[in-house]
Amino acid sequence: MNLEWLDAFLISGLFSVVVIIGLALLLHLQLGLTRIANFGVVGFFGIGMYSFGVMFTKVDWPFGDLPAFLISLAFGTLVAGLSGLLVGWLIADLDEDGVLVGTLGFATVVFILATTEQDLTGGALGLGGLKFPYDVGTVKADEFLWLIIVSIVVSLIFLYVWWVHRTPYGRLLIATGGNEPLARSLGKATFRTKLWLFAVGSAGMGLIGALFGVMERFLAPENLGIDVTLAAMVALVIGGTARAWGAVIGGFLIFGFFDIIVQSYIPFPKEWYGQAIPNAKLIVEGLVLMGVLLFRPLGILGAMQRDKLMRRVHG
Amino acid sequence: MDLDFFSKSIVIGLTEHAPLILAAIGFALLYRLTGLINVAYSETITLGAYFGMWFNTTYDLNFYTVLLPAGIVAGLISVGTYFAVFRPAKKLNVGALEMIIISFGLSIVLRHALQFVFGYPVRFFEVPPPVSIRVLGVGVGAFRILAVASVAAVSLALYYFIQRTSFGLQIRALASDEDLAQASGIRPLFVTVLIWFIAGVAGGMAGAFYGVSSSVAPLLGWRQFLFIFLVVVVGGRKGLGGVIITGALTGIALAAMTLQFGQVLYAQLALIIAFVVLLKWRSKRSIETVKV
Amino acid sequence: MVSETQQATVTRPQIRVQNAVKSFSGRVVVDIDDLMLGDQPIEGLIGPNGAGKTTLMRMIMHSTPLDSGTITLFNANGGGDVVISNLPTHWMAPHGLVKSNQVIMDFDNLTILDSMLLAVSTARYEKPYRIFDEPRLYADSVERMNEYMEYFDLGDPMRIAGSAGEKKLLDIIRCLLLEPKFLMLDEPTAGLPEEVTEKVVGLIRKLADEGTSVVIVEHDLNVIWNLCDEVHFMAEGSVVLHGSPEEIRQNSTVVEKYLGEGHV
């Protein structure tokens, strides 16, 4: 494959945009529809990433790379889903304070475990030995193929999230977020609904974490900072929390700008790329989050517009 | 487990984690009286540390001299965030959940903006090693004794202020019903600003103590935020007294577990789990009455 | 309106409230020794403001937990008796017990059609992996929904309910779509125009004829006198009188405490 036309920065830039969109889409189900502010996105992302990494590199697999890779991937997803179930159980009947404590606490727990369990995770030094489950020649070609694979996975997540709006399940999520006591009086088991929402959403975040880890090749606790949660939240909020497309538009808009345009196409002085630009990027993310929620709480796409949707579906 | 272990845990817990109690008092003040979960409070703490360090290293002042100015600057910044962000947000009728996310955004902005001002590398206070004093057979640095004294001073001042003065009455009135308070001739703006200022001073001083005992870095306040928040959510129902007691117990538990496990992270881990389970258990027992 | 067959000999569901106490910050709001609801098809619950009527209904739904006491639902959906004071709120509807709301309650983002589909949908359809069920759910329930839409002349269902009256009506429709065996209505006609009130009253009658037990809290006493077969008079947290509408109407205590001299 001749990939000379393709810039290596463009691959990594697009990859981070795709990963953030994936997380923002899952966050949309929790925050946008069900009104649960999950501040622990990075925790589920991280536990999926590390469970996958540890399983893949520390187990002496008797068969080839690809089956071992897939089993580890499934394992990472499962562990993230189970931890989502646990966290969901802890917070589903708590108010906003409790949700913040529980989800933030979970992310911190994952960070602590990644640091302390050195035999498994390599601690602060990190965990190496991850690799793509194939080899198509050059590193660039491998990475490009991985970008395509992850894009397909995130596209499937998008299709699911987009479709959920058109299902009785999606309606239940919106009802639970809109008026939980009323939903309960109509016979809806809102606690269990939130529980499963957390399990499914977290499994998805864990899967994305594992896929991200493969591209990184090297897992370290620095990957588990609050900026991952922030990125997903900013992408969703700027695009529109109430809409599935919000995550996609927001992700391309803000991270497309920073990770692709600023990174590759604007000739800033070289020394800025080390710390000044990443730092400025976070400031802008924070400002965008505040500005949008203050002056246009529903983001670019605005309200949920169930009327139009229902007309399309049942009209 | 012998007596030595207990006395060690108590002394280390109370002295090393006194800044936690101080910060929790400030956070609780905002949380209880304005109903706000201010994630950006962690940056009030961080900025207290940075300004303390800056006064200390720029003007060659000792730690005792810079402590209060650092707190005051943090208090002013705290009031500034109220006017710049939280007051407009309240006027725009932003929901509770959105308010938390806004404060999270502000926290990120401050945390990274300060790196443009103070630089990226980790900074340090320039102070001679403090005199060590033996308490119950455990050596404790003078700064830590001062931290405990500050907790006592701030709590007493707040107690006096809230219970005994007319401002305290106004604060309590404002917390229970803002409209009624306003109708009774209370100046809500002045009282609210006062609350933000005091909370900021407590946070800034806590930050200076954290900074002088290790280093000054952008994540200084954020690393403590979860524990401050846990202490306030769990202990805050019983007023400031509950916060102080919960904070003290948390400090002692952290110290004891750190001695036991030899790893401060394991102690934090156990504490997070214990607190979240406690919240869950408490919510099971008090089902909220809802209007259906 | 759902089925045209009159089932005269059904066993009606009943609710028994025993030793039920609820107090808010030390003040006893409800204190009932023994109360049977559902002896008659339609029963009214009246009393002065603060008598505890709404709180009692919320206690039955368990959206307000009891301090002590037992509440039992006899002849629940599927037969049998169920102690409902131990059950969470979302179990009431499956047992056939449904309550409409006094205050206006709606879902912020859901259209009228959504609200109705939400009511008719069951847990079976609402799983994260059941993603192709919407057409079937719609097809199964469109007739029932249309009947209500036409009966109340609601117009386009694919919009969010606008006025307070419309929301109130939607709340009642949601309850009816749940096919209640025991229906509690908390001020169902408050805020509704007169012709809609009449339609609601007509529907309640029909439902009662078909075997549903109905309990109504209502301040519009004309509705009570016209509709109810039995009336419970509540004051200061307990039910102090039962009787036919005529008996209650002429009772001196009721007149003195509640109706006032000019009302009889």
Image (cartoon, rainbow, N blue to C red):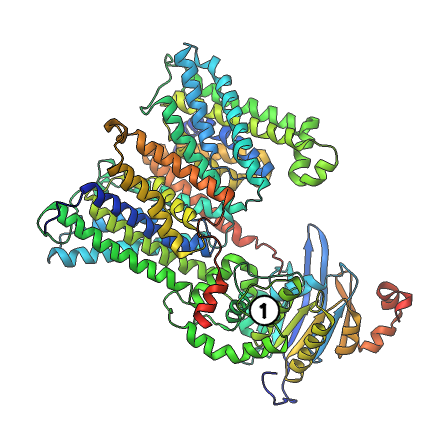
Q: Please determine whether, in this image, residue B56 is positioned above or below residue C224.
A: above
In this image, A31 relative to B90: left or right? left
Residue A216 percent coordinates (x, y) = 21, 44
Mark 1 is on which residue type? Answer: Ile
Residue C149 percent coordinates (x, y) = 59, 75
State the SS at label 1. Answer: helix
Identify the residue at the far top of this view.
Answer: B60
- Residue A50, can we see it? no
Q: Residues within 10 Å of mark 1 (few under 14, many from 20)?
A: many
Residue A27 percent coordinates (x, y) = 39, 52
Q: Residue at x 42, y 74 (%)?
A: C135
- Residue C221, can we see it? yes
In this image, B39 relative to C47: left or right? left
Q: Residue at x 49, y 27 (%)?
A: B203
Q: Please determine whether, in this image, residue A272 is positioned above or below residue B212.
A: below
Identify the residue at the far right of this view.
Answer: C261
Q: Please determine whether, in this image, residue B254 is positioned above or below residue C12.
A: above
Q: Please determine whether, in this image, residue B190 is positioned above or below residue A241.
A: above
In this image, B107 relative to A78: left or right? right
Q: Which residue is mark 1?
A: C84
The one of A154 and C250 positioned closer to us in this rendering: A154
Q: Quadrant of residue C172?
A: bottom right
Q: Residue at x 44, y 68 (%)?
A: A312
Identify the residue at the far left of this view.
Answer: A137
